[in-house]
Image (spheres, helix red, strand yellow):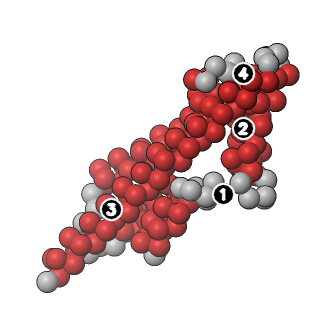
């Protein structure tokens, strides 16, 4: 079951409707409760901390992408609101489109920037989303490797 959680978490790092890294961490947590496999509580707490930090960064990085590409605080807020709306909209890929649109619309109407500058800020939101997805994928992959390593250690003890 823990291995399935790690695989689903890895897939979930690309599918925004699934909280990928928290699901992967649940896989490690499940392994912790198997008495035959040695998983230290330190490892469990460290991976939990990594999960919390990356989970928060997953929502913050797209907003910083807006700022990096010349957007204002309005563009950052627009990207954040767009991300939240995209997460709760059942239409596929809205989590990619809505932060982009949110940043673009906010830059156009609230910051009064031209279309070219608003588009640049919206592109920053998209780049930020790709960066946060990559970070979450790397975390989920690391958790899968840790899980697999612990299982291999247990198997070697049996032999």
> Can you identify the residue that label 1 sits on?
17
Q: Residue at x 71, y 39 (%)?
A: 99
Where 142 falls versus 81 (above or below)? below
Q: Residue at x 73, y 29 (%)?
A: 119
**Quick check: can you spot residue 84?**
no
> Can you identify the residue that label 4 sits on?
117
Q: Marks 1 and 2, Cα distance to the nearest angstrom?
A: 17 Å
- Please, which residue is most extreme toward the front here? 116
**Displayed quadrant of residue 127:** top right
Q: Are marks 3 and 2 in contact (CB under 8 Å)?
A: no
Q: Position of residue 87 (x, y in %)?
A: 71, 50
> Can you identify the residue that label 2 sits on?
100
The quarter of the image holding the C terminus is bottom left
Q: Position of residue 139 (x, y in %)?
A: 42, 51
Disc 4 packing (10 Å; few <14; some 14–19; many ≥20):
some
**Displayed quadrant of residue 141:** bottom left
In the displayed structure, does residue 51 sit left or right of residue 150? right
Q: Marks 4 and 3, Cα distance to the nearest angstrom?
A: 42 Å
Q: Which mark is residue 145?
A: 3
Q: Are marks 4 and 2 in contact (CB under 8 Å)?
A: no
Mark closer to the observer (4, 3): 4
Q: Earlier in the sequence, mark 3 or mark 2?
A: 2
Q: Are marks 1 and 4 in contact (CB under 8 Å)?
A: no
Q: Marks 4 and 2, Cα distance to the nearest angstrom?
A: 13 Å
Q: Are marks 4 and 3 in contact (CB under 8 Å)?
A: no
Q: Earlier in the sequence, mark 4 or mark 2?
A: 2
Mark closer to the observer (3, 2): 2
Q: Residue at x 36, y 55 (%)?
A: 142
Disc 2 packing (10 Å; few <14; some 14–19; many ≥20):
many
């Amino acid at each position: 079951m823990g291995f399935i959680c790690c695989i689903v978490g890895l897939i979930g790092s690309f599918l925004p409707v699934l909280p990928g890294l928290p699901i992967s961490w649940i896989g490690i947590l499940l392994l912790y409760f198997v008495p035959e496999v040695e998983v230290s509580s330190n490892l469990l707490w460290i991976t939990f901390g990594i999960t919390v930090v990356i989970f928060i960064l997953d929502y913050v990085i797209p907003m910083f992408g807006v700022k990096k590409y010349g957007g204002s605080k309005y563009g950052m807020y627009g990207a954040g609101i767009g991300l939240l709306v995209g997460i709760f909209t059942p239409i596929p890929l809205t989590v990619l489109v809505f932060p982009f649109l949110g940043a673009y619309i906010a830059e156009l109407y609230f910051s009064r920037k031209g279309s070219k500058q608003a588009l640049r800020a919206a592109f920053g939101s998209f780049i930020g989303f790709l960066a946060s997805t990559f970070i979450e994928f790397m975390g989920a992959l690391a958790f899968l490797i840790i899980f697999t390593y612990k299982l291999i250690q247990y198997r070697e003890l049996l032999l």
